[in-house]
Image (spheres, coloured by chain):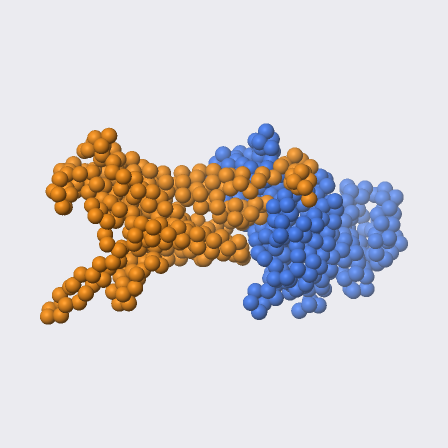
Chain colours: A orange, B blue
């Protein structure tokens, strides 16, 4: 059938013209965002965002900039250690909250709350619903992270000036944070597609993202002496590592003394290409699996 | 001509056969009731037609297009209400219907009016800008019905649409379904409620244990499978005024084909007859020619009920 004929087939007798799948994705994003902006969880996360920003601002103001911005090697007060302390940990935590809050039950909630029944029986591909919801979750998360970034840069500008305050490492770390966010949302959407219970999908993703991966990393490295290249937390380490004065060695062995015994403790740090590959790999694999699961999942 | 068709449609949940080789083709503007006991496979069938579940084998076609293979095209001319969907509690009916309108491609110049008209049709116009989260189940169901009708579809699939509604709401929904028939639409409606189907539908399909038992006009189904099994059927006749016993026993009971008469109330008489549709048609003409104020004439609910019970009993 030619495109014109197909288009004509999509226009019915009462003048409705079925939008393209891309336009339908846009519709899902629009209404998901509207739902987010009225939801308690968005405002709770916004509050967490602002509280973290306010606490850091207060602590730095109270203890002085030297308390977090002193280069451990040179002793100079610099922007890089400031960003390392301020951003390195907080950004990862905010990605965790955003992924769990916006992605944890994005799909499972459609089954549990039966809101999916309202959408799925319409002439719209399930993939359009999935992609639309994913992009909406990404945009909502970007708002949260954007606000924290603004607070971070505002503080840095106050202490180090607008022109000379932002090291290139922070710009890289910011980009890595966004890659981690994309991967984490892909991951939470996958688990959200796997379960029909919102509580279950939120709980599993929260446990895995918060300490599950880190625990596995530690065990695998310590007991098997294997690099945890399969771990999202390991890959996301580049967000904070890039902010260090010297990027950590890929492999390091430190002797630890336990009484009379000395044991070598091995630790790994993902290189930047490795970290990016792990995070993008997680996104691609979990996005495809999540989509396939949602396509096949039954509303019963 | 609008059509829906199930071709060898089967659905298995583990070892449980929910649908077994259903073959059903419904064409044209009409209302078809889909009857069957709980767990018979009604909702399963409708969910396959709306891509909410996948068939284990066979095909579900809407206007000749496979729902599973070309969902967008198949459902483009279709409005559906399956079970009792929930709407985001923070949305108003106007917003929920706007979303549906955008998904279905209702022209933006018409969206506002269509939403207002459709919500007025389901008596929800006063609640158009109130949050759905505060609505009762019945109110939500009305909004769901409005969402199914918003795009003025030529095919409407309804899964027990009166669920959750009070008697007045049920009556209003019946009126809505009746009014849909006037607009050359194919309506396929599952229901437990035999009076509802009898009142609204032209044809019935009965299903039990996942197997289609019969699909035909209500008259033919009740003629073949109803009553005493000997082919007797029942019609309920309504009169504009009270009808006395002498008229019933002296005139009505003696009309051709009439087997028995039974007064329901002063203005309604149940007439049992044999001879199928030809006699049913003749009986209406004869009653009208008596000039005794016939104002309604329809197959008796109890006849459909008897038929239903006969058919379902046979499959137990």
Q: Nearer the viewer, residue A216 or A246?
A: A246
Tally the numbered discs: 0
Relative side of A262 to B263, left or right: left
- A259 with respect to A106 (left or right): left
Q: Is residue B122 visible?
A: no
| Placement of A26 over or under A282, stated as above or below | above
Side of A59 relative to A232 (left or right): left
Seen at 13% across and 70% down, the residue is A261
Q: Nearer the viewer, residue A62 or B182?
A: A62
**Looking at this view, is B215 or A296 the one in front?**
A296
Q: Which percent across, then down, holds residue B264? A: 74, 52
The structure residue drawn at horizontal position 55% and vertical position 42%, both measured from the top left corner, is A21
The location of residue A241, given as percent across then percent down, is: 25, 49
Is residue A270 positioned above or below A119 on the image? below
The residue under the point 40% across, 40% down is: A139
Q: Nearer the viewer, residue A15 or B220?
A: A15
- Residue at the spot 78% in from the left edge and 47% down from the top edge: B297
- Measured as percent of width and height from the top left, residue B225 is found at 76, 62
Residue A300 visible to the viewer: yes
* Whole-percent x, y for residue B312 in the image: 68, 64
| Quadrant the N terminus of chain B occupies | top right
> Which quadrant would residue A260 be assigned to in this image?
bottom left
Give the position of the C terminus of chain B as an image quadrant.
bottom right
In the figure, is residue B158 to the left or right of A42? right
- Quadrant location of residue A228? bottom left
């Amino acid at each position: 059938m030619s495109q014109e004929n197909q288009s004509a087939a999509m226009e019915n007798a009462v003048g409705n013209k079925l939008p393209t799948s891309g336009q339908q994705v846009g519709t899902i994003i629009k209404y998901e965002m509207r739902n987010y902006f009225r939801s308690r969880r968005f405002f709770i996360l916004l509050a967490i965002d602002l509280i973290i920003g306010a606490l850091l601002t207060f602590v730095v103001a109270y203890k002085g900039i030297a308390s977090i911005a002193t280069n451990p090697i040179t002793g100079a007060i610099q922007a890089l250690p400031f960003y390392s302390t301020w951003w390195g940990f907080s950004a990862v935590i905010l990605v965790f909250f955003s992924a769990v809050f916006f992605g944890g039950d994005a799909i499972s909630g459609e089954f549990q709350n039966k809101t999916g029944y309202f959408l799925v029986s319409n002439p719209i591909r399930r993939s359009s619903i999935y992609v639309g919801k994913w992009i909406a979750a990404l945009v909502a998360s970007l708002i949260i992270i954007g606000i924290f970034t603004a607070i971070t840069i505002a503080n840095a500008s106050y202490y180090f000036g607008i022109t000379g305050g932002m090291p290139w490492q922070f710009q890289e770390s910011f980009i890595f944070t966004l890659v981690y966010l994309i991967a984490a949302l892909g991951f939470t959407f996958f688990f959200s597609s796997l379960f029909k219970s919102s509580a279950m999908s939120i709980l599993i993703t929260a446990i895995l993202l918060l300490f599950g991966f880190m625990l596995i990393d530690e065990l695998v490295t310590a007991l098997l002496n294997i690099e945890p290249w399969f771990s999202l937390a390991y890959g996301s380490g580049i967000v904070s590592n890039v902010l260090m004065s010297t990027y950590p060695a890929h492999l390091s062995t430190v002797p630890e003394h336990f009484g009379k015994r000395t044991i070598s403790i091995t630790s790994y740090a993902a290189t930047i290409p490795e970290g990016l590959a792990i995070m993008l790999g997680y996104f691609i694999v979990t996005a495809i699996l999540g989509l396939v699961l949602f396509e096949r999942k039954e509303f019963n | 001509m609008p059509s829906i068709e199930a071709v060898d449609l089967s659905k298995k949940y583990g070892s449980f056969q929910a649908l077994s080789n259903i073959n059903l083709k419904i064409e044209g503007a009409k209302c078809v009731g889909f009857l069957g006991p709980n767990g018979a496979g009604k909702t399963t069938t409708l969910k396959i037609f709306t891509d909410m579940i996948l068939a284990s084998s066979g095909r579900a076609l809407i206007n000749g297009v496979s729902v599973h293979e070309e969902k967008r095209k198949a459902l483009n001319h279709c409005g559906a209400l399956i079970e009792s969907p929930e709407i985001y509690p923070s949305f108003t009916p106007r917003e929920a219907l706007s979303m549906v309108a955008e998904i279905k491609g209702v022209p933006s110049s018409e969206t506002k009016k269509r939403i207002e008209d459709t919500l007025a049709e389901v008596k929800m116009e006063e609640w158009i800008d109130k949050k759905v989260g505060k609505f009762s189940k019945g109110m939500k169901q009305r909004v769901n019905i409005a969402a199914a009708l918003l795009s003025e579809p030529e095919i409407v699939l309804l899964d027990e649409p009166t669920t959750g509604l009070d008697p007045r709401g049920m009556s209003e929904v019946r009126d809505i379904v009746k009014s849909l028939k006037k607009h050359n639409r194919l309506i396929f409606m599952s229901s437990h409620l035999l009076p509802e189907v009898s009142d609204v539908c032209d044809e019935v399909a009965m299903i039990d244990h996942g197997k289609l038992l019969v699909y035909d006009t209500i008259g033919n189904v009740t003629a073949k499978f109803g009553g005493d099994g000997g082919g007797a059927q029942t019609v309920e006749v309504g009169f504009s005024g009270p009808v006395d016993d002498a008229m019933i026993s002296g005139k009505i009971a003696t009309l051709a084909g009439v087997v028995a008469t039974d007064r329901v109330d002063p203005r309604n008489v149940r007439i049992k007859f044999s001879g199928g549709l030809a006699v049913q048609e003749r009986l209406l003409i004869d009653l009208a020619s008596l000039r005794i104020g016939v104002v309604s004439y329809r197959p008796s609910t109890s006849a459909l009920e008897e038929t239903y019970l006969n058919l379902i009993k046979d499959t137990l």
